[in-house]
Image (tube, grey):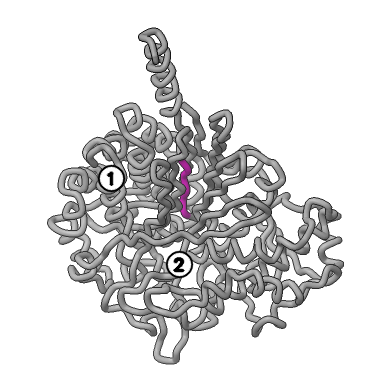
Amino acid sequence: MINNFTRLLIVFWCVGVSANENKIAIASAHSLATQAGFEVIEQGGNVYDAAVAVAAALAVVEPAGSGLGGGGFFLLHRARDAKQVMLDAREKAPLAAHRDMYLDGQGLWLKQKSQQGALAAGIPGLPAALVHLSEVYGQLPLSVSLKPAIRHARAGFKIGARHQRLIVYRLPAILNNPATARMLLDNGETPKAGAVLKQPELANTLSLLAEKGRAGFYAGVVAEKMLESVKQGGGIWRQADLDQYQVIERQPVQGEYRGIKISSAALPSSGGIVLQQSLNILAAYPLPEMGKIERMHMISEAMRRAYHDRAMYLGDADFVEVPVEQLLSLDYAAGLRRSIRPDRALPSAYLAGELQNDAKGRNTTHFSIIDQQGNRVSATLSINSPFGAAFLAEGTGVLLNNEMDDFSSKVGTMNSYGLVGGVANAIEPGKRMLSSMTPTFLESDRHIAVLGTPGGSRIISMLLLAVLDFAGGGDPNAWVQVPRFHHQFIPDRIQFEKGGLTVEEQSALAAKGHQLKEVRYRYGNMQAVQLDKQTLQLKAASDPRGEGAALVR
């Protein structure tokens, strides 16, 4: 029989555990977004409310990477019932879109039309995702979760050096749209780092979303202004596009690597499939026992084969049949492994016809959240190129994406990230374009990790290197600092970040037949958090290549 004193001790212990379990780790690409997440937690929100706050704040304070005019993927885990789901908020092709919409009369690809201006924009998914996440998984109304984002949009925030650099990068496109130029530039000039960016029209749009939910964006005055602006800009959106947009709950890609459970993004993201396929190929090799050059060679060869299959087979599974089970089977991985020579790189031309291109891109955003109960969110969001299509919908403050460029506008032609695609990713009305965004969970006997990164076609290879570091015992600070290299089948070369390989390493890889190219900058902006299941200790890390913030409270 339990006496009163023992009962008091039990109550005291339970309160202590409860308070302890409320601790949370958040890592995002901007300090104001990370703080927005904690602000909502302090008002009684859960990790999903925090995710709404962080995503909305990033749409305001990191407009080069994401926004209400874009979309993304939210990977969720709910501890009380072990529910795991991916919210697919990927943009969709307008209903008036067609396969040849970016080709001229001679069948040549009109690159600028798929990358700049209103015609480049898919139907946005982020606003619908914020509503869905709040209503289905959150505890607070949108009016509370969106408050930090509304405040930063109205009062303004100081832009950083990265924001300034990306404006310079997209300056010609920005100048091509007067509304975009008025919002982002200072009398037609690049603003100085530290200048205050105010977005009152975006604050009004966010307020309508907070008040009316989905109808605050996909209907009413905001929808009317977007449709008129897109029409004037040569786009093809219609009200039916906005009416029909829906977030889809999908089953994540599940896999395993050396005892580590992996959950990652499902189609229309290629991330989970390509990541798991790479790991399946590598699982038979004793990577920790190999020399560094041999290990890098094997990893690059695994990447080459997985990215080859991405180009050949992957697309929106609601529109095309994708052999997912085969691609993820261990027998299939064993077959691919048989073509890997330990002493020599196999040219990509042996896998498929070789193409040449040097296109690149590098934007998007990511955040990771976990609490001590194991509830977690890994979210990668994007408007594609920095500042998307560089097209502002007049009167809304909404920068539109240029995600239509992620379709295969012409089979075998590379997009702005140098990725090729086949008929599986061809443009169709209402179809979701293939993505490389790879929000991911890892779980070992001891740890749970939540991670992801921006980086275009290099996202998956960055996650692969981080998973291997996790398998080797590294923590979040280690994963975000791993030197990065990448192979995506076409172009046939290992790309590596500035300073990522020594001269000796480059020579050794070249001796195995690899072509190499150093990227002129350090790429990626990984955000990672981890829970120790035994001690309940939380860790968080933000990529030193970026300007983010990772905190535990």
Q: Which numbered disc flags the more N-terminal residue, 1 or 2?
A: 1
Residue drawn where x is 36% and y is 48% of the image: 184
Tell me if I can see residue 60 in this picture: no
Q: Give 283 or 493, whichever is nearer the viewer.
A: 283
Distance of mark 1 from mark 2, alpha carbons?
Answer: 23 Å
Rendered-image quadrant of the N terminus: top left
Disc 2 secondary structure class? loop
Residue 394 in the image: above or below residue 29: below
Q: Position of 491 compared to 326: left or right?
A: right
Mark 2 sits on what residue?
267
Residue drawn where x is 61% and y is 39% of the image: 446
Q: Give 410 or 252, whichever is nearer the viewer.
A: 252
The image quarter in which residue 15 lies: top left
Residue 520 in the image: above or below residue 26: below
Q: Position of 83 compared to 237: left or right?
A: right
- Name which residue type carries label 1: Ser
Q: Residues within 10 Å of mark 2 (few under 14, many from 20)?
A: many
Residue drawn where x is 16% and y is 55% of the image: 215
Residue 365 in the image: above or below residue 347: above
Highlighted magenta segment, given as a residue range: 364-370
Estimate the x, y position of residue 302 in percent, counting from the top left: 69, 67
Tell me if I can see residue 89 in this picture: yes
Q: Give 215 or 404, whichever is nearer the viewer.
A: 215
| Magenta-colored stretch includes residue 369 | yes
The image quarter in which residue 444 lies: top right
Mark 1 sits on what residue?
134
Residue lying furthest top in this view? 5
